[in-house]
Image (cartoon, rainbow, N blue to C red):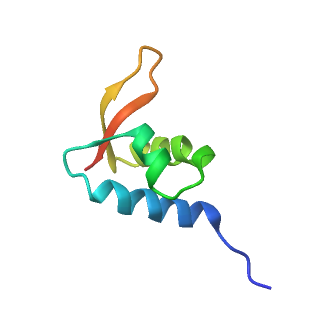
């Protein structure tokens, strides 16, 4: 039996979705339309941000990402 890496699948789905919007996209749109598990979207975006692969365009008052784009 092979193990399925769901996180890796979600990372690929999110990256593919982000690449469609070079000027940025709302995180709510990523959650709704990227095809990734909605509970993994924020952790993956945070990981991409710390790996310097993501630019945050808009943040909420509490610091959560609202609009992002790939670097």
Instruction: Give x and y (percent) for residue 28.
Output: 44, 38
The relative height of residue 3 versus residue 63 in the rendered view (above or below) is below
| Residue at x-position 34% and y-position 51% | 53
The relative height of residue 29 versus residue 3 in the rendered view (above or below) is above
Examine the image and state in which quarter residue 29 appears: top left
Instruction: Give x and y (percent) for residue 43.
Output: 55, 43
| Residue at x-position 28% and y-position 59% | 19
Instruction: Left or right? Give the position of 1 relative to 49.
Output: right
Q: Which residue lies furthest to the front in this view?
A: 32
Instruction: Left or right? Give the position of 57 relative to 29.
Output: left
Instruction: Give x and y (percent) for residue 61.
Output: 42, 14
Q: Which residue lies furthest to the right in this view?
A: 1
Q: Which residue lies furthest to the left in this view?
A: 23
The relative height of residue 70 versus residue 19 in the rendered view (above or below) is above
| Residue at x-position 41% and y-position 31% | 65
> Quadrant of the image for the N terminus?
bottom right
């Amino acid at each position: 039996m092979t193990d399925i890496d769901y996180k890796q699948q979600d990372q690929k789905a999110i990256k593919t979705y982000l690449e469609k919007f070079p000027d940025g996209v709302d995180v709510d749109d990523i959650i709704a339309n990227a095809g990734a598990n909605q509970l993994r979207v924020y952790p993956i975006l945070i990981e991409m941000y710390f790996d310097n692969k993501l630019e945050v365009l808009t943040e909420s008052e509490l610091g959560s990402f609202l609009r992002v784009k790939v670097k």
